[in-house]
């Protein structure tokens, strides 16, 4: 299989701060997604990003496939950003693996 | 205009019972999935169907049986429920492009509690 590791496991921020979440994977992947699981348990798509950089408002993501990592940037964090952030990879076309997540708590 | 829907949202049942969870997607996707999220929030794929055909079957007890009556529906039937089956079950769907790359979209989850 493939190992998908996320760091840090836990992160506490003051509202307005910036942060970077990291996802490392141990083998080449076909695809990578970032999700936000909000406190109500809903999994929300953030980015579909097998390579390159994408931006969506205060969030952006970069995947460097050749070096087997992806980064999620959150700028000017808000309390509504709290929750768990997962990266998920598609490996060997029909295998899907999630990382163990980064739990983010943004304090007002 | 819910994209991926699941019923029920909550399911509380006794050990040994049989239960089903239903999933429907209106995105026109060809591929659907079931995932299990345990108490530590770890997400693991269980099954995947492409156009009603099983393509992924991870190491899951055969008490779990997926059924896909058509490509918009993927149901999960669980026999002889055990305490360890308590978890949140997520359904997901994805298109399947020519490169085989799949962006997945998730349903709201079904929280199963086995007493």
Image (cartoon, coloured by chain):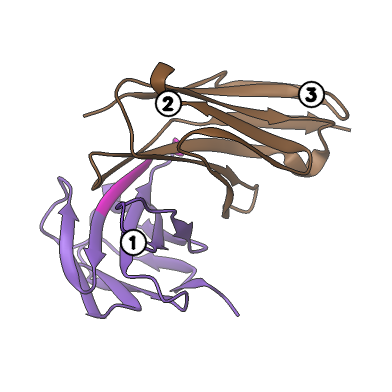
Chain colours: A brown, B purple
Residue assigned mark 1: B96
Q: Is residue B44 magenta?
A: yes
Q: How crowded is mark 3: few (under 14 residues within 10 Å), some or many (20 or more)?
A: some
Whichever of labels 2 and 3 marks the residue nearer the N terminus, that label is 3
**x then y, percent, for residue B28:** 42, 76
The structure residue drawn at horizontal position 48% and vertical position 73%, both measured from the top left corner, is B5
**x then y, percent, for residue A94:** 23, 48
Q: Which chain is mark 3 on?
A: A
Q: What stretch is highlighted in magenta?
A: B40-46
Residue nearer the viewer, A95 or B19: A95
Number of the label disc, if any, that sits on residue A40: none
Residue assigned mark 2: A65
Q: Which chain is mark 2 on?
A: A
Mark 2 secondary-structure assignment: helix
Between the C-alphas of marks 1 and 3, the distance is 35 Å
Residue assigned mark 3: A18
Marks 2 & 1 on one chain: no
Q: Does the magenta stretch include residue B55?
A: no
Residue nearer the viewer, B57 or B29: B29
B47, above or below A98, in the image: below
B3, above or below A93, in the image: below
Quarter of the image where the N terminus of chain A is located: top left
The residue furthest left is: B62
Marks 2 & 3 on one chain: yes
């Amino acid at each position: 299989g493939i190992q998908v590791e996320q760091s840090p496991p836990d992160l506490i921020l003051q509202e307005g701060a910036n942060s970077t979440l990291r996802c490392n994977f141990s083998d080449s992947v076909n695809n990578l997604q970032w999700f936000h699981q909000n406190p109500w348990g809903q999994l929300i798509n953030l980015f579909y990003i097998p390579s390159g950089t994408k931006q969506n408002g205060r969030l952006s993501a970069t995947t460097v496939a050749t070096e087997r990592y992806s980064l999620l940037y959150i700028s000017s964090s808000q309390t509504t950003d709290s929750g768990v952030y997962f990266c998920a990879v598609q490996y060997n076309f029909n295998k899907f693996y999630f990382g163990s997540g980064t739990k983010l708590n943004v304090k007002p | 205009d819910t994209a991926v829907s699941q019923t029920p949202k909550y399911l509380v049942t006794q050990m040994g019972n049989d239960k089903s969870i239903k999933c429907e997607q209106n995105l026109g996707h060809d591929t659907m999935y079931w995932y299990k999220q345990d108490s530590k929030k770890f997400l693991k794929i269980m099954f995947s169907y492409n156009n009603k055909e099983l393509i992924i079957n991870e190491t899951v007890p055969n008490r779990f049986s997926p059924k896909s009556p058509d490509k918009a529906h993927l149901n999960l039937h669980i026999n002889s429920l055990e305490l360890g089956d308590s978890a949140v079950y997520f359904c997901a769907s994805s298109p399947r492009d020519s490169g085989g790359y799949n962006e997945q979209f998730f349903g709201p989850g079904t929280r199963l509690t086995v007493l």
